[in-house]
Image (tube, grey):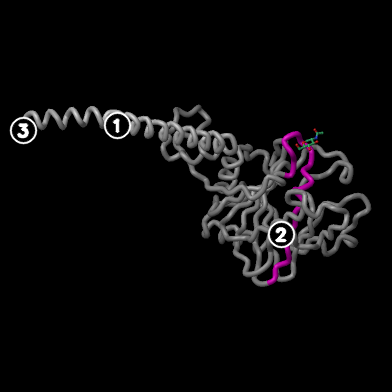
Amino acid sequence: MKSRGKLLGQRWWSLGLPSVFLLCLFFFLVGLFGSTLISQQDVQVDSVRPRSRVLESVEEFDALPNGETGEHSLTSISFQVLSWFPRAVYFPNFATEEQCQGIIKMAKAELKPSALALRKGETAENTKGIRTSSGMFISSSEDKTGILDLIEEKIARATMIPRTHGEAFNVLRYEIGQSYHSHYDAFDPSQYGPQKSQRVASFLLYLSDVEEGGETMFPFENGQNMDANYDFRKCIGLKVKPRRGDGLLFYSLFPNGTIDPTSLHGSCPVIRGEKWVATKWIRDQELDE
Ligand SMILES: *[C@@H]1O[C@H](CO)[C@@H](O)[C@H](O)[C@H]1NC(C)=O
């Protein structure tokens, strides 16, 4: 038995060693090749969207010591980038249902037909029909319920633009058939004259669902439809369907301060239901309320 064992052992050594060696080499090479492939993929993914990888791992992050004006804990505000041209971001569940209802309640009694900022040569008469909603303005300090204060604070945190840059909320109601033709929120000095300050961005908080129609549209999204033939009443391009409590932020200016032509937007006619929206325009200068 002893000699047989020894013989087997010797055979194993004499026959097996090269095979074991080859097997090891094979797995080593497979491993090496595989890992370089995977790491190449990693590098590609990293270089395309390095930010989202960082942002997605936020749950594993312990809050850092905060500065005097900072916050000691993490906040998660979900968002979806809807478009880069214009820079438009969607925030689901930005406000609660009760907050939305509260804002509608405070606005309802004060509604007046919405006005337009007029360009040279325009009058209330010859611009009739461009904006058919009713609306009112209310600042957070005028709202005794404190709802607008909370919303304004949240907008400031989401945009990192101080709330002193925000105009008063403009609460609008669109009834069936009412709409707002495509327009810019920023004021082009060549059309409106010199401006003391400019609207950088707009934050829309949808206060109601709309059964049909009433979408916020960006007809020039990613440069589409930008020929001279675009009819400003036409509801085309990127359309955002209003959902109660959701927020939409878009920038009217490029980082260099010039107007982004793709930020043209409008409100499609309401077909069924009613649309309520609160808009906050954010300026490049502080405003004194
Ligand atoms: C401002 O930025 C936009 C977008 O990057 C660019 O197309 C435009 O030429 C710039 N304008 C000026 C005056 O720098």
* Amino acid at circle 3: Met
User: What is the magenta segment's predominant secondary structure?
Assistant: loop
* Amino acid at circle 1: Val
Q: Are marks 1 and 2 in contact (CB under 8 Å)?
A: no
- Quadrant of the image occupied by residue 276: bottom right
Camera-side residue: 132 or 93?
Answer: 93
Disc 1 is placed on an element classified as helix
**Residue 254 on the magenta span:** yes
* Amino acid at circle 2: Gly
Q: CA distance from mark 2 to mark 3?
A: 101 Å
Residue of label 3: 1
| Side (left or right) of 241 relative to 195 | left
Residue 128 image point, x, y percent: 85, 63
Location of the N terminus by quadrant is top left
Q: Residue at x 60, y 63 (%)?
A: 208
- Quadrant of the image occupied by residue 48: top right
Residue of label 1: 20
Q: Which residues are magenta?
A: 252-271
Residue 277 image point, x, y percent: 65, 58
Q: Residues within 10 Å of mark 3 (few under 14, many from 20)?
A: few
Q: Residues within 10 Å of mark 2 (few under 14, many from 20)?
A: many
Q: Is residue 50 above or below residue 272?
A: above
Residue of label 2: 135
Q: Is residue 167 visible?
A: no
